[in-house]
Amino acid sequence: MPASKAQQAETAERRAALIRLRLAGVPFEDERILSLGYASRGAASKDLIRALEERRDEQDAAASVYRQQENERLDALLEAVWDKATKPSTVYGKDGEPLGEEIDLKAVDTVLKLMDRRAKLLGLDMPVKTELAGPGGGALRLSAVSLAELNNLINTAGDLDPDADSEDDDTLYDPADDEDDTDDD
């Protein structure tokens, strides 16, 4: 049975208060949150998740309506210029005499722009893959790091070999291993 209007209003008010408290950094187990009517920390957490999901669903629905409206506008504009872009029309000279038939290139350009706008609106284009590379396609060093920072990055990346013994870890960088560690610039 769906909740009554009064219950829905009460739930919305409780959730709004919960969100305000969480934004202020109040933990779920705090008495201010529990006093909103939640039986436990878990109940408050679940209700917050439900509130955020409902809000996301509302936003998705609003975005869908917007996309539909924009699509209809693009359809109307496309319909207005389609014939000029696809059917040749007579071209007249300065003396008023017909010179021949041509497609209106400005209309073609407009159609292409409308089609591009629709593809962006609907996400039809494939994402562009970009990659940064250094000389010869190698790694690009963005900034200098200390040995401690490098070792920390290696450690947080995880073991390359899950069966490797942590005491025999040869993934740590040791500058003594580099014989060519001098700059000849």
Image: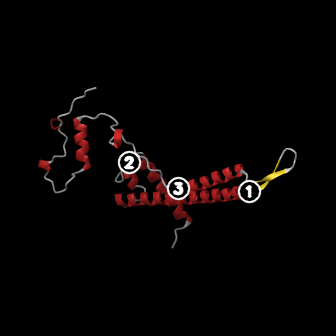
Between disc 1 and disc 2, the foreground one is: 1
Give the amino acid type for the residue marked by disc 1 in the picture. Answer: Ala
Q: Residues within 10 Å of mark 1 (few under 14, many from 20)?
A: few
Which of the two discs, 3 and 2, sits closer to the camera? 3
Decide which of 9, 81 is in the foreground and name it: 81
Query: Residue 84 in the image: x percent, y percent?
Result: 74, 55
Task: Give the labeled residue for mark 1.
Answer: 80
- The answer to whether 146 is drawn above or below residue 25 in the figure is above
Say whether disc 1 or disc 2 marks the residue closer to the N-terminus. 2
In the image, which disc is placed on residue 177?
none
- How many residues crowd around disc 2 within 10 Å: few (fewer than 14), some, or many (20 or more)? some
Q: Earlier in the sequence, mark 3 or mark 2?
A: 2
How much space separates mark 1 and mark 3, taking CA atoms? 24 Å
**Alpha-carbon span between mark 3 and mark 2:** 43 Å
Location of residue 111 (image quadrant): bottom right
Three-letter code for the amino acid on which mark 2 is drawn = Val
Q: Could you say whether the residue bearing mark 1 is in a helix, strand or loop?
A: helix
* Residue furthest out toward the top: 185
Residue 171: x and y, percent? Answer: 19, 46
Image check: 60 left or right of 181?
A: right
148 vs 10: above or below? above
**CB contact under 8 Å: marks 1 and 2:** no
Asked whether the viewer can see residue 9, the reply is yes
Quadrant of the drawing holding the C terminus = top left
Residue at coordinates 41% horizontally, 49% vertically from top-left?
22
Q: What residue is drawn where x is 74% and y is 59%? A: 87
Mark 3 or mark 1, which is nearer the start of the sequence?
1
Q: Are marks 3 and 2 in contact (CB under 8 Å)?
A: no
Name the one closer to the observer, 172 or 137.
137
Kindly identify which residue carries mark 2.
Answer: 26
Residue designated by label 3:
125
